[in-house]
Image: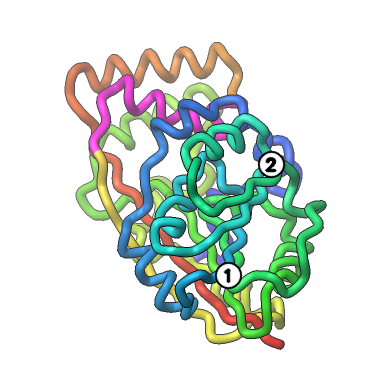
Amino acid sequence: MPETPAWLPSEETRKPLRETFDSTADLYDAARPDYPEQLFDDLVELAALDPGARLLEIGCATGKATRPLLLRGFSVVCVELGAQLAEKARSNLAGFPVEIHVQPFETWRGEAGAFDLVYAATAWHWVDPSIRYEKAHDLLRAGGHLAFWSALHACPEGFDPFFTEIQEVYDAIGESHGGDWPPAPPEQEPDFADEIERSGLFADVRVRRYGWERGYSANEYIALLETFSGHISMDADKREHLYREIRSKLGTRRVRRHWYAILHVARSKT
């Protein structure tokens, strides 16, 4: 099993790529999948969150991981890099006890020890790895928790053959998958428990895995791709060729895309 997942951005691409999402706020809100409700139930249990707990979310985007926790009775402070994403989140979350600050998490000045939970949904890997654990730890109360997860493309046994067919198109345009194809099934994908422990700031690391499936028409699948940083930043001619091939290969049928998420929850050391 590889120690570093192939999907992680490199140090050189992390900062410019994370800034691409703000250009597609409305599409991001419509096309990105919701996370499983069981994930939030487990998060509340593993982080021992009491009613009224104060949460900090890193990179809330349009609020897909914010609303489920607001509905469970918590207040949330969000730190979001993109102004358009933040504005969409404010609209989506109107009437809830939520604050949204537009700023990189790395430079945001929050109150030390003010939060019961610091969490990130599909955003932790975009935060500077040299400071993210230390800053999250400083913002947590004694015994508070850190949690993060991502929604990623899963290739379990029997995954839709369309993805192997379209991978040949990615190869032809010089946008090959980073790593072996097909990738490891989701149950074999590495987690970040060791990395959390190496920070020396957290203990009692718990990991949970989730899988789900969604069907997409060609246009719906292209809309989803338009929210991924690699496709947003792709050369326009390559992107148009890719999308033509997707429409040609799918026709009127729907593609089955599997998703997985690995939830990490760890307790802050005092």
Tell me the magenta residue range: 215-233
Specify the farthest residue to the front: 95
Q: Nearer the viewer, residue 96 or 32?
A: 96
Residue 171 showing in the rendered view: no
- The residue carrying mark 2 is 81
Name the mark on residue 88.
Answer: none
In the foreground, 134 or 92: 92
153 in magenta: no
Left or right: residue 99 versus residue 211 is right
Q: Is residue 226 magenta?
A: yes
| Helix, strand or loop status at disc 2 | loop
Badge 2: residue crowd in 10 Å (few <14, some 14–19, many ≥20): many
Up the image or down, 195 lies above or below 125; here it is below
Q: Nearer the viewer, mark 2 or mark 1?
A: 1
Where does the image place residue 112, in percent across and percent down from the top left?
A: 77, 70
Would you call the spot at circle 1 few (<14 residues within 10 Å), some (14-19), or many (20 or more)? many
User: Residue 155 or 97: which is nearer the viewer?
Assistant: 97
Per the picture, the main secondary structure of the magenta-coloured stretch is helix
Of callouts 2 and 1, which one flags the residue occurring earlier in the amino acid sequence? Answer: 2
Q: Is residue 23 left or right of residue 94?
A: right
What SS does tag 1 mark? strand
Q: Residue at x 48, y 45 (%)?
A: 95
Q: Is residue 47 above or below residue 162?
A: below
Q: Quadrant of residue 55?
A: bottom right
Label 1: which residue? 117
